[in-house]
């Protein structure tokens, strides 16, 4: 038997925490520590100099996607009674992005195998970047039904639900800019990412702290 404090909501919160922590490490900390930028030829040279550290980031991304398979299924059990169709869409959008991101992970591993040929490694990194861009579409889309379900259910404050829904459109705006190759200021990119970051981290912590107390 699991301890009484581990409710369905807290199980979902633990899975969300795994997604958040591995995502911060693999998608934020490692690229920042390596000073990776838009030029993948330069990135290949940087990666070659710290390959073991870069591999840790890839391992973190793999763990992130494993946790991201578990998370929507736990949230479905928590929220499905507040909208079965919305819950099905949430799970579908979330899981649809996982194979795309794992494909990007495979190209990043291929890039390591191509080193020290930085030109070929850069092509593999370009392919990985394109697949991550497609994966971001689904990272955004699943937040919209999740936000609506949170709003309906009352498992978290409605301002968190609103941030989750806004986060969907922030991701889609980033994907649109990436596909159209629009030059956007760094501050603009940060602003687009902010609602999703605040909403997801806030929702995760709320589930862990309060166990998803549902309004009557």
Image: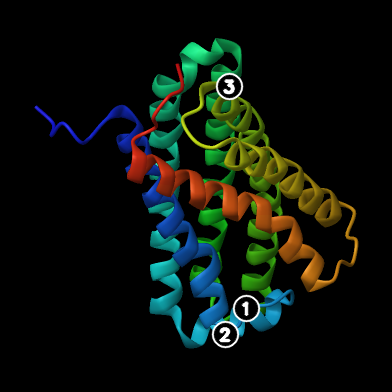
Q: Secondary structure at mark 3?
A: helix
Per the rendering, the mark at residue 71 is none
Q: Secondary structure at mark 1?
A: loop
Of callouts 2 and 3, the N-terminal one: 2
Q: Is residue 188 left or right of residue 91?
A: right
- The quarter of the displayed image where residue 135 is located: top right
Of callouts 2 and 1, the N-terminal one: 1
Query: What residue is pinned by disc 3?
Result: 152
Name the residue nearer the viewer: 137 or 192.
192
Identified at 56% across, 13% down, the residue is 83
Instruction: Please provide percent x and percent y for residue 86.
Output: 60, 18
- Between the residue at mark 1 and the residue at mark 3, the CA separation in whole angstroms equals 41 Å
Query: What residue is pinned by disc 2?
Result: 46
Per the rendering, the mark at residue 36 is 1
Of callouts 1 and 3, the N-terminal one: 1
Identified at 58% across, 21% down, the residue is 152
Foreground mark, 1 or 3? Answer: 3
- The quarter of the displayed image where residue 162 is located: top right
Q: Are marks 2 and 1 in contact (CB under 8 Å)?
A: yes
- Between the residue at mark 2 and the residue at mark 1, the CA separation in whole angstroms equals 7 Å
**Screen quadrant of the N terminus:** top left
């Amino acid at each position: 038997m699991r301890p009484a404090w581990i409710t369905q909501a807290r199980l979902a919160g633990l899975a969300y925490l795994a997604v958040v922590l591995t995502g911060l490490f693999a998608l934020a900390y490692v690229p920042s520590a390596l000073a990776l930028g838009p030029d993948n030829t330069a990135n290949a040279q940087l990666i070659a100099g710290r390959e073991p550290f870069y591999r840790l980031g890839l391992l973190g991304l793999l763990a992130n996607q494993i946790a991201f398979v578990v998370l929507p299924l736990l949230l479905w059990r928590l929220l499905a009674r507040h909208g079965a169709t919305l819950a099905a869409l949430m799970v579908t959008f979330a899981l649809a992005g996982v194979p795309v991101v794992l494909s990007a992970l495979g190209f990043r591993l291929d890039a390591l195998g191509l080193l020290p040929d930085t030109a070929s490694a850069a092509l593999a990194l370009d392919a990985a970047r394109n697949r991550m861009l497609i994966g971001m579409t689904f990272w955004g889309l699943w937040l919209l039904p999740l936000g609506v379900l949170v709003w309906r259910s009352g498992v978290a404050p409605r301002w968190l639900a609103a941030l989750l829904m806004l986060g969907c459109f922030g991701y889609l705006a980033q994907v649109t800019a990436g596909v159209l190759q629009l030059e956007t200021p760094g501050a603009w990119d940060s602003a687009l990412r902010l609602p999703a970051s605040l909403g997801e981290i806030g929702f995760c912590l709320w589930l862990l702290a309060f166990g998803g107390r549902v309004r009557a």
